[in-house]
Amino acid sequence: MTLICAIKCNNGIVLGSDGQAAVNTTGGAIRHQIQKIHQIGDKTVFLASGTIGLIQKSMEIIKRNSKELDTGLNTNTLEKIKKEIFPLLKSARDTYIQYNNKTEGAPAADLLLCGLDKNKELKIWHMGADTHDEFIDVVGCYCSGNGETFGYSLLKSLMQSSSNVTSGKLIVYRTLRDTINALAAGVGEPIDIWFIQDTGLVHKLSNGEMDGLSTAYKKWKELEANFLSGNLEKFKNKKK
C-alpha cells in the first residue's frame, strides 16, 4: 500500500510518500521498497497511490506529455492526459470485476501532478480512480492511500496559511511518520520528500536532509510530551 501527501506553501509545494509497496503473487503479497515520487520533464512532479501496474502505465503516458507539461500545467494538456489514462483504468477495473464478480479490491490509481501553470502559479492537479479531476491547491493539502483519513486530518491540523517550504517539509515528514507509527502495517520506510520551489526548481531531499528532519521531528515530539506532562501535573494539583 501507499500513502502520499502534498502541501502547498507560500513559496513552493512539498510532496512526500512512504516507501513500501506490495506485489501480489500466488503465494500472497510480497512487500518491498519502491520510489513513488518522480520528476517529469524539468518542472513537474508525479506521485500516486494504488495499484503499482496502473501507476507505472499512467506514468508512461504522462512522460510522453513531458514537453507540454514543461510549459505549464494547462487544462488542455491535463485533459489530454486524462483521456489517455481513462481507458487504461476502466479496462483494468472491468476485467477484474468480470473475473472476480465483485468490485471490492478492483485495481485503481489516484494521481497527483504538481508544478507551475503558464502564469507561473503553483498548482496541484489530482485525478481520482474514477478519473474525475480537480486542482486542489486552493484547499492547500492532500493525502491519498492507506491511512489517508488519519494522514489528512493530521496534515490539515498542522499546516498553516503562512507555511513556507522549510516548515512544510517538517509537517509532511511528521504526517508520514505518525501515520506509519499509528498504522504499523500497510505503509512503511523509507520516507521520501521532495519540493518544488515557486521558481519551478525541483529538489529531492538527500539522506542528510532527511536525517535533519528526523532530528527536528524527535525534538517536536519531546516538546509536545513535556508540554502535555506539565499541563497534566497542573491539572492534578488543581484537583487537590
Image (cartoon, rainbow, N blue to C red):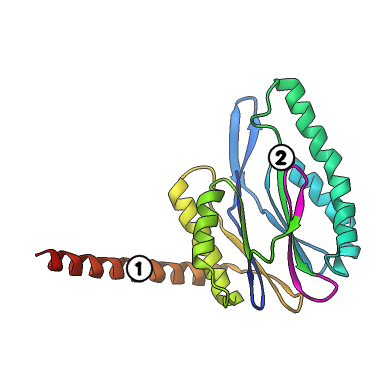
Residue 70 x %, y %: 86, 68
Q: Height in image: 66 above or below 111?
A: below
Residue 108's disc number: 2
Query: Which residue type does callout 2 highlight?
Result: Ala
Residue 60 x %, y %: 84, 50
Q: Could you say which is closer to the camera, residue 31 or residue 106?
A: 106
Residue in view at x 49 percent, y 58 percent: 177
The answer to whether one can see residue 5 in this image is: no
Residue in view at x 58 percent, y 40 percent: 31
In the rendered structure, does residue 120 fall within the stretch colored magenta? Answer: yes
Q: Could you say which is closer to the camera, residue 6 or residue 2?
A: 6
- In this picture, which residue range is highlighted in magenta? 117-133
Picture quarter with the C terminus: bottom left
Circle 1: element type: helix
In the rendered structure, does residue 118 fall within the stretch colored magenta? Answer: yes
Find disc 1 in the rendering and name its residue. 224
Q: Height in image: 138 above or below 101?
A: below
Residue in view at x 31 percent, y 66 percent: 225
Picture quarter with the N terminus: top right
Circle 2: element type: loop
Are there few (<14), some (14-19), or many (20+) residues within 10 Å of tag 1? few
